[in-house]
Each structure stands twice: as structure tokens, then as C-alpha cells.
């Protein structure tokens, strides 16, 4: 029976169309951020007759970035490294190549922002003076930085752009992919009315129990397949360009750090940790959305209405959250942030260009960690399953 | 084996679809007659355990069917009045799917499907998608799916709609050979479909079971009441409303009437042998006829 239920789902053209649409979306993001042609000229020669081309497209840019940071990879972050990287940055700017402004580089720039130093000014605690191109600058010490971010182990310099790009884009692809799940599962139960099969099914021996289990299982198999296809395609795209290395880049050295995570304590975690959390929590959220969609499907006997209801339920909170994103203290926003759809970005856009370890509270209680939220989704899934079973058992053919 | 219906009523918001329906079935073929909206389908859905009666009990061998749950459902074969199907499934895979729902294992399901397809004349279409089937072919597929589990209780709601005369004969033979030691309930409007195969007839009207009996028993109730006469048009027009007119044909200036009446309606009328159709119309016209007078 399971294979027939899977077959019924796979026969649905909308499933394939929407899956292809999601993959096209993933690819277009990949194209835009990685493959796109983008000629960059040396800024010092751009107005001459023979401008020097630094790169022709994003791929070449990535290659240049990797070459640029290669000598620093694996080095512990200390005052010397910070100085070296800042000098490198100013040198690049001098040479007209400031475009090769890598993200880890940017984070050094952001965290160790060089302030022009005036001889008379006093040096505040935790700061030091460095000289770049004969100019003096005031820069925070690494020791002070560690203190502020609560890091208890030395941060090692890495190039984790591939994993960061992958995590960011995958999150969005997965959100769009939820639409596939909603559209294709909304008809699992309600569609039987359309085909006038409800009475026929429920009059059979297995129609009220086993069939429900098979439908749910088939839906979960399709949901998992969707999740893994989307994840695999994204991994293949980004990692084939960026390479596999860089997973252990500390989050504090990543652009991801300038956003507040959904109670994921970012001190001491790597971009790989964030990627894995996205996968694990995202998968659980997929399961939860699938189960809730199935539950809605079992309540309604029109598959179109059930698509609409499910879509509104999932996508509306996201739109609302985005609308209110600048004020995280709102109870409403925090509640909405608990909705499955908001799990994928794993974080809230704070609009604050300084990294933050988030501490979001709801009714004065700190929100539980992302893992506890995910766990509660699992519970919700199980409850949905039980409700579906009870409901189908009670349901009559009218 | 006994299927017992005790005091079943079913009301929808504004209609009482079934009104205190009582009867019981032992193995045999039962014809279930009734006009549109009489409540046949409602009774059938209740019997198939997919609709809860407002009141009353259906029991199988002494146990309530809701309690027996899938033990009961595994004993029934059901063809709904509007048979549902997945348009993109082939006849063969559709039957395998229903088999799976009925808890028949893969191997047995294939054997049974291969056995049933020729019986309903669909062997050569087994791998065609159902959406390409004609109405009658779909109906035959519906009959086949109801029989997959060798049901002890076969309930077919208007099984012969859409079947051509040859297929009707096929169907009757199929039911006759299948019905041994089984309860077969056929609802229909077409009296001739059940005349030769039904052991008993049940007639339902406005939610009530108004009569039940063997064909002969029921026919005796209108014995010596069916008349044939030929009269002129004007007279025919006049008496039409006073009698139960079963048939009316024209020949030259005369009208030939088939009338049900306790007494000779007209000088020169000839007594005819009663058939099931007369019976059906007798029950359905009679009450209305009386209603009209009141
Ligand atoms: N879901 C429903 N909601 C409201 N009324 C209903 C519903 N289903 C049936 N009815 C009413 O119940 C009565 C009996 O309907 P039912 O379908 O049982 O008749 P039937 O004898 O099968 O008629 P037919 O020969 O046309 O199939 C009708 O008056 C019908 O309008
Ligand atoms: Mg009916």
C-alpha cells in the first residue's frame, strides 16, 4: 500500500513542477552569487586606455580570495595577524584591488576597526596603536576582543566562505521548498474526496488505520526526498566551487556573526556547526510542516482550500516576521519566530552590524535553544499524526 | 451469518433520509428498489460502516458493526453509487491498490485481479489508464473492485447503470455464480436487472421500508389487478388520473392502457399477468394516488 501512496504523490505533476521551480531558484541564486559574469578593473587603471582586469567573473574572484588568504589559514588570531591583515587590506586598496575584500577579511575589519590616531588622544584600555603606511591607527587588542565575545579558546583564521554561502542560500531554498511540500501534501487526504474515493477507502479493512499510516509514511518519504534533493543540489553547487575546506571557521570570523541567532550561542561555534544545525533543524521543520499540512488536509475535503490554508499558515508568519524584524523585543515577533518557517534562516536579522549572542525573550522568559524548539516540532508532528488518525476514524462519508 | 438492521434512522439538517428502517439479511440476493431520494444510498452507506446512523443499530452475527470495525469491513465489498477512481491509474494497478486496502497480500491480489478482469470483460484493457475508460467500463471496474476480497457481504449501489444489455446479462450471471452463501444487496431502479436473480425484493419509499418479500409473494399482492384495455383518447384522458396507469401506447385512434385496479376498470379490459415493473409502479403510484385524493 505504501508504494501506491508514493505513486499517487509522484503522479502529481505539481510536485515535479514545483520541485523544478525550487531547483531553478536555487540555481539562480547560485548563478547570481557565484557564476555571474562580472568584470572588475583595477581601480587605478580603470580610466586608462588599457585597464587591468582583476577578474572576469565571481569564480575568478573566489579563486583570488582563496589565494590571498591562503598564507594566513590555520594561524591563530593574534595582534600580529590582525596587523598583517589590516596592512594587507590597505595595500590592496592602494593597488586598486580593494574588490578582493574577503569576508573573513571584512570581519577583521569590522571587529578591529582602525581608528585614525591623534598623538594627543589617550589610548583607552584594550586598544593598541599600529602603523600602516606611515599613518597611526588605534585598534582593539585581540585579548580585549576575546574578552568581549566571551571566547575561551583561540580563534584560528580560516576561509569558510563556501560553507557560509551554502548555509545562507540553502536556508532560502529550503523555505521555497516548503511550498513544494505544502502543495503536494495538501491533497493527500482531502484529494480523496475529489476522486470520490473516500467512501471506498474507508469501507475497506485497512482504510481507516493502515491506509492513514501509509499515507503519512509516503508523505514523509517524499518530504525527506525533497529535503535531501534540495540540500544535495545546493551542496554540490557551492562546494564544487568553493571546495570542502573551511568548515571550522569560527563563527566570529564570519559575516554570519553580524546577526543574532535563534538562541544558538555563537561563542565557540564554527560555520560547519551552523550548517549542520540548519540541516538538522530544517529537516525537523520539514517533517513538522508535512505533518501539519497532512492534518489540515484531513480536516478539509477540498484540496485547493487545504493548499491555501496551509500556505497561509506557513508563509504568513514569515512575512510578518520580516515586517517586524527591527524590533526583536516584540512578543508577537518572538512568537512568530517560533513558527517552523523561521527556523531556516536560523537567525533573526537584527539590523545591527555588530555580532550579537542573541538573548531573545518571550514574556520575560528566555526562549529555549533552537534544538529545544526543534524537539517541540517533533512533538507537534506526533500530535498531528494522532489527531489525523482519530479524525479519519471518526470521519463519515457524506 | 446474519446482518441485522434495527431501527435505523438518519436525518440530515432538513431531511429525514432514513426513517426507522428494520430488516435482516441472511445469505441470498436482495434487490433494493426505491425512487430517487428514497434513501437507498443512505442505508447502504450505513451498512458499509462509513456513515453513522442518527439512531439504530446494525449488527453482524450479533455484534455491532462499529465494534467489529475492520473485522466487519474486511467482510464487505462495496460499490458506491458514484464510483471513484484515480484517472491516471491503470485498471490493473487500481485493483492492486484496492486489494492492498483490503489487506490482501501482493501475490493473492495479483491472482485475484487476473481472475476478475476477464469476468468483467476488462482483460484487454487491464493496462489502460482508467481515464480512457467508457462509463460502462468504469462501472465494471467498480464491480470488480468490490469483489476483490471475496466479500461475505456484497453491497452494490446501482451496479448496472451504464451497462449495455450484453453486459447486464454478464453481470447477472456473475452475481448468480458469486452469491452462494453470501449476502448480496443490489440497489437499482431497473427492475428487470434483479427480477431474475434476486431472492427477495425490498422496496423503500421516503426513508421507510414499505415492503419486503420474494418476487412471487409480492406479485401475488397485485395478482388479478393488472388490466389491459383499449379506449378512445378522450376517455383515456378522463380516467388517467383515476387509475394507476403503467403503460400507455397509441394505435390509430385508440389508446392502449395497462392499468392496475382492484376491479375491472372498463368494459372489455383483459386481465394480464403481473410483473415486477407493475409491482414497482403499483407501490410508487399507489401511495401518491391516495395522497392526491386526500
Ligand atoms: N449529505 C447529505 N446532506 C443532506 N441531505 C442528504 C445527503 N445525502 C442524502 N441526502 C438526502 O437524503 C435523502 C435520501 O438520499 P439517498 O441518496 O439515500 O437516496 P437514494 O434512494 O439513494 O436515491 P437515488 O436513487 O437517487 O440514488 C434524499 O432526500 C437526499 O436529498
Ligand atoms: Mg442512491
Image (cartoon, coloured by chain):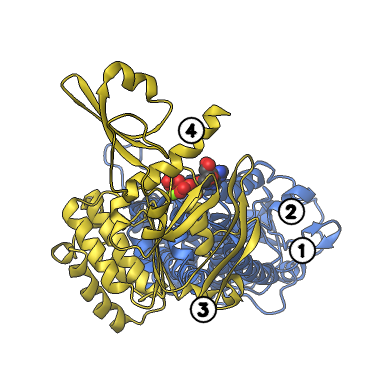
Q: Residue furthest top?
A: B234
| Mark nearer the N terminus (4 vs 3) | 3
Q: Report whether A44 appears left or right of A37.
A: right
Marks 3/1 same chain: no
Give the image location of residue A364, x and y in percent.
Answer: 86, 58
The tag on residue B71 is 3
Q: Residue furthest right?
A: A364
Q: Residues within 10 Å of mark 3 (few under 14, many from 20)?
A: some
Question: Whole-Å distance between the Cαs marked 3 and 2?
Answer: 50 Å
Marks 2/1 same chain: yes
- Circles 2 and 1: CB atoms closer than 8 Å: yes
Give the image location of residue B84, x and y in percent.
Answer: 37, 55
| Mark nearer the N terminus (2 vs 1) | 2
- Of tags 3 and 1, the one toward the viewer is 3
- Of tags 4 and 3, the one toward the viewer is 4
Image quadrant where residue A153 sits: bottom right
The tag on residue A367 is 1
- Of tags 3 and 2, the one toward the viewer is 3
Question: Whole-Å distance between the Cαs marked 4 and 2?
Answer: 72 Å
Query: Which hue belongs to chain B?
Result: yellow
Q: Is residue B22 above or below residue B274?
A: below
- Which residue is labeled 4 in the image? B289
Q: Nearer the viewer, residue B9 or B229?
A: B229
Secondary structure type for disc 3: helix
The answer to whether residue A329 is seen in the rendering is: no
Marks 4/3 same chain: yes
Q: Nearer the viewer, residue B36 or B105?
A: B36
The tag on residue A334 is 2
Question: Whole-Å distance between the Cαs marked 2 and 1?
Answer: 8 Å
Query: Does mark 4's beta carbon lie closer than 8 Å to ligand 1?
Result: no
Q: Nearer the viewer, residue A269 or A204?
A: A204
Amino acid at each position: 500500500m505504501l508504494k501506491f501512496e508514493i505513486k499517487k504523490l509522484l503522479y502529481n505533476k505539481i510536485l515535479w513542477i514545483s520541485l523544478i521551480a525550487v531547483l531553478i531558484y536555487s540555481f539562480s541564486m547560485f548563478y547570481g552569487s557565484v557564476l555571474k559574469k562580472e568584470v572588475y578593473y583595477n581601480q587605478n587603471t580603470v580610466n586608462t586606455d588599457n585597464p587591468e582586469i582583476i577578474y572576469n567573473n565571481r569564480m575568478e574572484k573566489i579563486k583570488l580570495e582563496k589565494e590571498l588568504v591562503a598564507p594566513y589559514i590555520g594561524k591563530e588570531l593574534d595582534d600580529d595577524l590582525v596587523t598583517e591583515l589590516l596592512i594587507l587590506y590597505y595595500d590592496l586598496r592602494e593597488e586598486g584591488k580593494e574588490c578582493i575584500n574577503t569576508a573573513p577579511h571584512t570581519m577583521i575589519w569590522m571587529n578591529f576597526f582602525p581608528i585614525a590616531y591623534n598623538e594627543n588622544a589617550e589610548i583607552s584600555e584594550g586598544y593598541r596603536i599600529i602603523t600602516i603606511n606611515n599613518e597611526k591607527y588605534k585598534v582593539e587588542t585581540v585579548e580585549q576582543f576575546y574578552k568581549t565575545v566571551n571566547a575561551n579558546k583561540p580563534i584560528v583564521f580560516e576561509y569558510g566562505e563556501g560553507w557560509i554561502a551554502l548555509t545562507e542560500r540553502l536556508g532560502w531554498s529550503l523555505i521555497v521548498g516548503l511550498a513544494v511540500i505544502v502543495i503536494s501534501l495538501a491533497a493527500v487526504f482531502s484529494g480523496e474526496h475529489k476522486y470520490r474515493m473516500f467512501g471506498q477507502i474507508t469501507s475497506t479493512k485497512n482504510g481507516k488505520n493502515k491506509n492513514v499510516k501509509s499515507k503519512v509514511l509516503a508523505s514523509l518519504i517524499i518530504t525527506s526526498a525533497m529535503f535531501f534533493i534540495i540540500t544535495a543540489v545546493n551542496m554540490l553547487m557551492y562546494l564544487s566551487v568553493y571546495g570542502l575546506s573551511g568548515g571550522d571557521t569560527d563563527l566570529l570570523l564570519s559575516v554570519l556573526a553580524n546577526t543574532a541567532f535563534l538562541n544558538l550561542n555563537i561563542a565557540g561555534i564554527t560555520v560547519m556547526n551552523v550548517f549542520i544545525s540548519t540541516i538538522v533543524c530544517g529537516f525537523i521543520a520539514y517533517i513538522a510542516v508535512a505533518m501539519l499540512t497532512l492534518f489540515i488536509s484531513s480536516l478539509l475535503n477540498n484540496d485547493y482550500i487545504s493548499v491555501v490554508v496551509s500556505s497561509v499558515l506557513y508563509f504568513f508568519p514569515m512575512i510578518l516576521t520580516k515586517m517586524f524584524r527591527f524590533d526583536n523585543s516584540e512578543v508577537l515577533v518572538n512568537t512568530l519566530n517560533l513558527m517552523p518557517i523561521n527556523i531556516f534562516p536560523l537567525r533573526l536579522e537584527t539590523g545591527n552590524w555588530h555580532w550579537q549572542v542573541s538573548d531573545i525573550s518571550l514574556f520575560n522568559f528566555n526562549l529555549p535553544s533552537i534544538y529545544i524548539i526543534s524537539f517541540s516540532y517533533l512533538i507537534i508532528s506526533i500530535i498531528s499524526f494522532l489527531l489525523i488518525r482519530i479524525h479519519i476514524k471518526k470521519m463519515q462519508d457524506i | 451469518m446474519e446482518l441485522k438492521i434495527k431501527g435505523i434512522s438518519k436525518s440530515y439538517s432538513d431531511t429525514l433520509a432514513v426513517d426507522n428502517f428494520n430488516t435482516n439479511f441472511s445469505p441470498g440476493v436482495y434487490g433494493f428498489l426505491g425512487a430517487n431520494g428514497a434513501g437507498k444510498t443512505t442505508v447502504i452507506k450505513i451498512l458499509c460502516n462509513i456513515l453513522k446512523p442518527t439512531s439504530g443499530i446494525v449488527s453482524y452475527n450479533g455484534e455491532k458493526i462499529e465494534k467489529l470495525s475492520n473485522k466487519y469491513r474486511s467482510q464487505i465489498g462495496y460499490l458506491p453509487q458514484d464510483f471513484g477512481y484515480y484517472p491516471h491509474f491503470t485498471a490493473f494497478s487500481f485493483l492492486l491498490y484496492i486489494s492492498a486496502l483490503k489487506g490482501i497480500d501482493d501475490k493473492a491480489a495479483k491472482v485475484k485481479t487476473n481472475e476478475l478482469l476477464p469476468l468483467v470483460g476488462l482483460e484487454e484493457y487491464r493496462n489502460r489508464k482508467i481515464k480512457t475508460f467508457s462509463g460502462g467500463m468504469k462501472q465494471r471496474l467498480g464491480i470488480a473492485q468490490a469483489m476483490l476480497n471475496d466479500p461475505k457481504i456484497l453491497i452494490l449501489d446501482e451496479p448496472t447503470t451504464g451497462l449495455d444489455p450484453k453486459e447486464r446479462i454478464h453481470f447477472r450471471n456473475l452475481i448468480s455464480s458469486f452469491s452462494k452463501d453470501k449476502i448480496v444487496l443490489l440497489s437499482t431502479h431497473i427492475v428487470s436487472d434483479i427480477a431474475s436473480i434476486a431472492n427477495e425484493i425490498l422496496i423503500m419509499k421516503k426513508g421507510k421500508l414499505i415492503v419486503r418479500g420474494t418476487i412471487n409473494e409480492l406479485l401475488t399482492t397485485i395478482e388479478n389487478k393488472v388490466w389491459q384495455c383499449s379506449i378512445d383518447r378522450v376517455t383515456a384522458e378522463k380516467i388517467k388520473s383515476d387509475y394507476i396507469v403503467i403503460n400507455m401506447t397509441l394505435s390509430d385512434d385508440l389508446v392502449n392502457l395497462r392499468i392496475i385496479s382492484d376491479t375491472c376498470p372498463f368494459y372489455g379490459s383483459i386481465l394480464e399477468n403481473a410483473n415486477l415493473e407493475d409491482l414497482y409502479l403499483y407501490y410508487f403510484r399507489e401511495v401518491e394516488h391516495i395522497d392526491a385524493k386526500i
